[in-house]
Image (tube, helix red, strand yellow):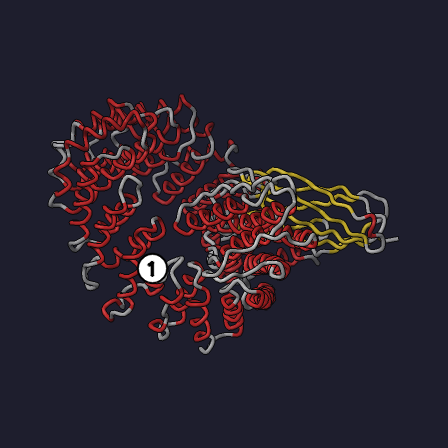
Amino acid sequence: MDGFSYIIQQFDRGIQSRLISEQLATVVNTVSLVKKNPFPNLVNSMVVRLSEHFVSGPNSLRGAIARSLSQMEEQLLLVFSHNEVCRRLLVVSHSNDPIARAHTLFALSSIAVIAKENKEVHTFVVDSLSSSHKEEFNGACSALAAFCRLSTEFTRTVLAQISEYLLSSTSPIERKIQIVSIFSHIQSDQESSHSIFALGAKLFELNTDLTFLSTLLSSLTSLAILTRFSILDQLSLLLSVLSSTVDCSPPLSFVALSNISRLANHAHVWTKEHISRLGEYRHRLTHDEDVCCALLHTLEVLGRRRLPSHMGVLQEILSEMSPLYSHDSLKIRASFIAFSTHVFVSSPSDLHRQNLLNSISSSLSVPLPTKIGVKISKVAGVFLTNDAVSDEEGLLLVSSLCKLPLSHSNVTLFLHLFCLLSQKRRAFVPPISKWARDAIQTPSSSSLSPSQLSFLAFPPFAAEKEVDVSPFNKLPYTILFEIVRSGFRNGHWRSISMPLLKSMTKLSLSCGTRDYLVALSQLAQSQSRKCTVSDVQSSVALLALSKRSFIKLSRSSLNPLQSFCYRYVEALEKTRQAQMQLMSTLTVFVSFPSPDGPPLSIRPISFRIFEVLQSCLPILSQSISEWSLLLRRSFDGDDHSIDLISLEMYSASILVYGVKCIMESDAPNLPLLPPLSSDSVIINETRSLLLWAASSMQQLAGRQGIVTTKTLDHFFSVFRHMYTRPVFIPRLFFQPTRRTTIKLSVSPGAEGELTVSPSIPVPIRLDGVISTSRKTKIEAIIVSANIHYYSARGRDRVEVRRVETHDGNFFTAQFLLKFEESAQMDISVELVDGEKRKTWLSDASTTLRVDVNM
């Protein structure tokens, strides 16, 4: 019995139990079973069985089935017997029990994704809208919303009845609100959309209930954003509503402005007249705090879009509202600072720069409510990291904040702001680092995050002698680990991470956790200190130990880790091995004069240097390949992590380039700096160092094969800077911000084994489901089947299929293969993302053993 048959057998046993509690438990567990095994045959069988028991079960079971179906919307796309499922559910629609009909409507709304074109379902939902029973009407509204969101034809069918119901004076206002809220996600063509907006205009004139009007305006705005072609009409309607309510109904004015700010995200359709008309209300809205803040937020969103045609009007409005820089209301002041900052970023002005510096400084120096303080500190980060603000002006503001006592109520905001600033501009690092070190030594700073303080106190490129981690030794394990992580990410492996890891291993920990800390400790000890052969040999040995530890951990069920950890250490180990071989061979030929001694003699070197350098090229090229492979496996990496890996690969390329400059008579091509997506002190400083190294290596080119001690000394001087530079562990190593998993199922052969007859084509199908937290769409899947014959290795072959994903998360690849002898088929998967069109390697793989029955 294969795995799917066993799952279905267990389901049948539970759902057919005499105890209703066991039946309910089985239904609830179905959701997790389907999500763990999202393959068409299994999902289809489970959903069909649920629909069978929906017909025969009591209302409690029907409700549980409806809720379970609503939790497996993605997996329902795999159901292929949807007509059969709908037919069985509709059997209950003829029941005299309104509760049973309500459960049917909720179940149909849950499976709308596969029933959206079923006419019988459409008819039942429309008829149920006239029900007087509350539960049945709620179910009808739920189904109405689900089907309108997916089917344009259903929207056309139901629109006339909805209009009649909403325009009727006898319809309860509560039910009208329920139906109007459906407009926000409706799927419609242009004709239906115009009908809905015309209906909305009538409803606005006929109703006075604030809740109804608020829901109506919000729903129409959502529909306008969804259809795009109605944005201008909706904007004109909202501006008219604002004009008629600005003096008499602040709550409705606030609703209108809130919806206008949503349309501001589509600033490309706005005209200067729209913005000018909105700006006319700037003096009439300041008496109400919420309404004024809504106006300022709308202007902020428009400023954030930075459209050149809008900036002139926005600058005029900003200048006329300048008194708000010092407004008594902190909420209004914060909103105005945000608006001013985004206009300033697009169109810098000396006057507004000084006003912003003063306003931000004065605002942050007084106690602030949490929400307002967070907003001002975020905007301050955007302002201070802008190039239009000089280092001197920014340092004055940062220094004034550093001088405030650590007992200040906004000190947590300062900490977050300083973390942002220290990553963006190196000029801010010294005062912030001193502030953080003082805070560590001050007892009153115990409320501040130790990991963030350590991140600031020991910034990247700080001298090792400045680091003292003794104040952290008595902190809890979780906080210590955060500090360890900061040490690795800031390049302080030995000085921060290693001593803390040694103290942490003395704690009472699980075996898996202890092994993980040991692996990290070995990695920390491998950090380079001096450019000597003994140092690099020690580093290589420690990296080898760390790699073995991470490989063991990645295979452990007690402490599973991403494969990225050991692959990163493996790439670093390969780089160190290449550096060790290069250093070992070159030190024979390189002289080391005293800084105060006589200049180097320029004497030719033996031709044996060419043989030595030639022997180093293969392992140097391997190190580039390791980083390149790691980069292709970093699909879940954030931009900063990917940039760090790219720079390590570029560093290895520079060494290869330098060796070729010495060996070849013609100048080789200079390696290109890979495109970088992030902007931080670490990235910028590392990039500058590597560009300098590449430029320095370029000076060795074109010497017509003549090598002197001066040539090698120059090379070795550049090499020393590259070897001793800090290496920054990417965030992906510790905490991936995204997670992508791929589950595979092979049929036939679900258990990994398949018996076939010789020379007869066998259809093999691979079903896969992708679960990802990335917003980038996966456009295509490349499936590779490596076929290895046990007794005839020379006949091994690779079959490749490129398939499109359907519904974004599912894919199917089919093979028609002949096997003359027993073989093993290793299947691997690559991803093609829809944004950068890059091909990424995944960890998803499966093996099928094929036995040929002679």
Residue at 57 percent across and 45 percent down: it is 700
When asked about the image quadrant of residue 412, the answer is bottom left
Q: Nearer the viewer, residue 123 or 797?
A: 797
Q: Nearer the viewer, residue 216 or 399?
A: 399
Residue at 40 percent across and 57 percent down: it is 461
User: As shown in the figure, which amino acid type bears the numbered disc 1?
Assistant: Leu
The answer to whether residue 421 of the structure is visible from this angle is: yes
x, y (%) of residue 620?
Answer: 63, 53
x, y (%) of residue 318?
Answer: 19, 33
Q: Residues within 10 Å of mark 1 (few under 14, many from 20)?
A: many
434 left or right, relative to 610: left
Residue at 33 percent across and 37 percent down: it is 181
Residue carrying label 1: 456
Q: Quadrant of the N terminus?
A: bottom right
491 shown above or below 155: below
x, y (%) of residue 714?
Answer: 54, 52
Secondary element under disc 1, as helix, strand or loop, is: helix
Residue with the most extreme front position: 598
